Image (cartoon, grey):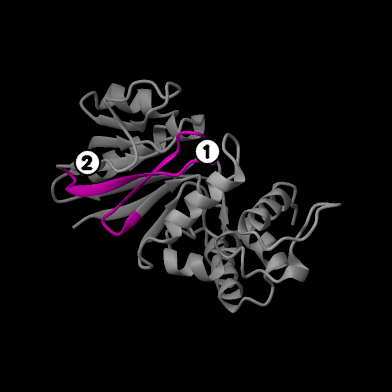
Amino acid sequence: MLSLRPLPALGDNYIWLLADVAAGSALVVDPGEARPVLAALAADGLRLTTILLTHHHADHIGGVPELLARFPDAAVLAPRDERIPGATRRVADGDTVAIASPAAHFDVLEVHGHTRTHVAYHGEGLLFCGDTLFSLGCGRVFEGTPDEMLASLDRLAGLPGNTQVCCAHEYTLANAAFALTVDPDNRALIARADVARTLRTRHQPTLPTLLEEERAANPFLRVAAINDTRMPWPAGAQPSRRRVDRFAALRAAKDTFHA
């Protein structure tokens, strides 16, 4: 049996820990710092066997050197990006990751947009998607294009609906505030926002979320369904039914949104 835990880090990051407690082994995803990982491993008597990295940003890889100092035999899997040092294996789209302990298999998906080499790991009913897909939102388009980011989101949205989406940040409430401005009558969204507020009041994580819930409530997965009168078109822009134009307008509006 595998157990999944989000470890809070760096203010609003989550480092995901997947463990086989009986075997005493664990893997982590995107350890931006080592301290919470080391504490969780020590508390449960676990050894770290594998580190999965989705992209090169410091808040996702910053803890790797310290973790390797404590667990030098741990495998480090990362996309093909020279900005991520120390990988023991470089992965790309279509690769399969087979981990002996904790026993787990993942398919690698390239999901460009946030960065030019971003990957996600899908398997065991889980999706480790880094900063591509968020609960009720998506990542900023830093190195890619709106077309690439939308294609990446479409690809993730096509996975099974019961997939648990393991995002890398606790952004649900902020994303909900924006989503409700463009999709205010969406009952699934209203319900998700209510649940998220309750969870955060109790200092509990809003993640993981289910992919089917994201498809119903996340405006960035529903760009074609957002009412035209609610679309936040930039000044001077002509309304469009092209999905990529609508996505770009939503993402640009979210970039400057303040609740």
Image quarter hosting the N terminus: bottom left
Q: Which of the labelled discs sits on residue 10, or is there none?
A: 1
Stretch of the chain drawn in magenta? 101-126
Whole-percent x, y for residue 200 in the image: 55, 61
Give the mark nearest the N terminus, 1 or 2. 1
Secondary structure of the residue carrying numbered label 1: loop
Q: Nearer the viewer, residue 244 or 19?
A: 244
Q: Residue at x 44, y 69 (%)?
A: 212
Whole-percent x, y for residue 246 in the image: 67, 58
Q: Is residue 13 above or below residue 126?
A: above
Whole-percent x, y for residue 189 in the image: 59, 71
Gap between marks 1 and 2 measured at Cα: 22 Å
Image quarter hosting the C terminus: bottom right
Q: Which of the labelled discs sits on residue 46, or is there none?
A: 2
Q: Residue at x 60, y 78 (%)?
A: 187
Does 35 lie within the magenta span? no
Q: Residue at x 63, y 62 (%)?
A: 176
